Image (cartoon, helix red, strand yellow):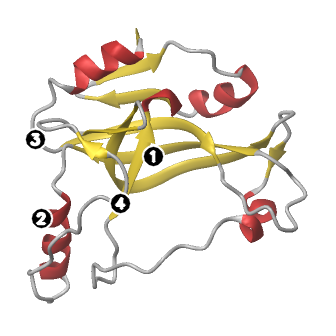
Amino acid sequence: MKALTTNQLVELLATVKGATFATIITETDARLVKTGNPFGDVRKVSRVNVTLGFQYEKAVNRQRAREGGETDFEAAPRQWGERKPGTMLVEHKGNLYLETKVERSLDCQYFTADGKELTAEEVKPFLPKKGASRQEVEKEILVRDYALESIRSIAFGGEQYVMLQDVPALVAEPIMQNA
């Protein structure tokens, strides 16, 4: 396992050509709804298989073709952020995000601010509702933009990288052991 700074990750991602499968571990705000939420701020630690360097429009049209639909999907402009040309990065308000296509969620854990682990069943009633999709497919193409600072580790091309940053041990250790 190799350690990287955020700047080194940006440089490494610039070397990726074409669609590439990766596994990432991220720690993000679970963004639970406020009304009735007894937990307060909750962190979500996820291990996810993703595709880097994919083309959204083509991915949706391939899925439409698999499902016997029309392949005339055109992506709308991004609702936030600006794609950095020739990269898989998005810049928004001075922060960089990695644009990914989610293939499969491998593991997900939730933690309160004081480190107590919550079950998915406890958290589910307070997760925000998903909006409607324009894709017109049964199996939606899930695109997620992860702030580079939320990435704890990334593995692709036969290498695994851990990010150099302050990671709360109680959050990172359980999921890193399953990586």
Residue 58 image label: 2
Tell me which amino acid carries mark 3. Gly
Q: Earlier in the sequence, mark 1 or mark 3?
A: 3
Q: Quadrant of residue 165?
A: top right
Q: Residue at x 45, y 46 (%)?
A: 48
CA gap, disc 4 and disc 3: 24 Å
Residue 175 image label: none
For the N terminus, the quadrant is top left
CA gap, disc 1 and disc 3: 19 Å
- Left/right placement of residue 36 relative to residue 128 reads right
Q: Earlier in the sequence, mark 2 or mark 1?
A: 1
Tell me which amino acid carries mark 2. Lys
Tell me which amino acid carries mark 4. Gln
- Mark 1 is surrounded, within 10 Å at the Cα level, by few (under 14), some (14 to 19) or many (20 or more) other residues, namely some
Q: Earlier in the sequence, mark 1 or mark 4?
A: 1
Residue 79 image label: 4
Which one is closest to the eye, mark 1 or mark 4? 4
Q: Secondary structure at mark 4?
A: loop
Q: What residue is shown with label 3? A: 18
Q: Is residue 66 above or below residue 41?
A: below
Q: What residue is shown with label 1? A: 48
Q: Secondary structure at mark 2?
A: helix
CA gap, disc 3 and disc 2: 13 Å
Q: Residue at x 70, y 30 (%)?
A: 171
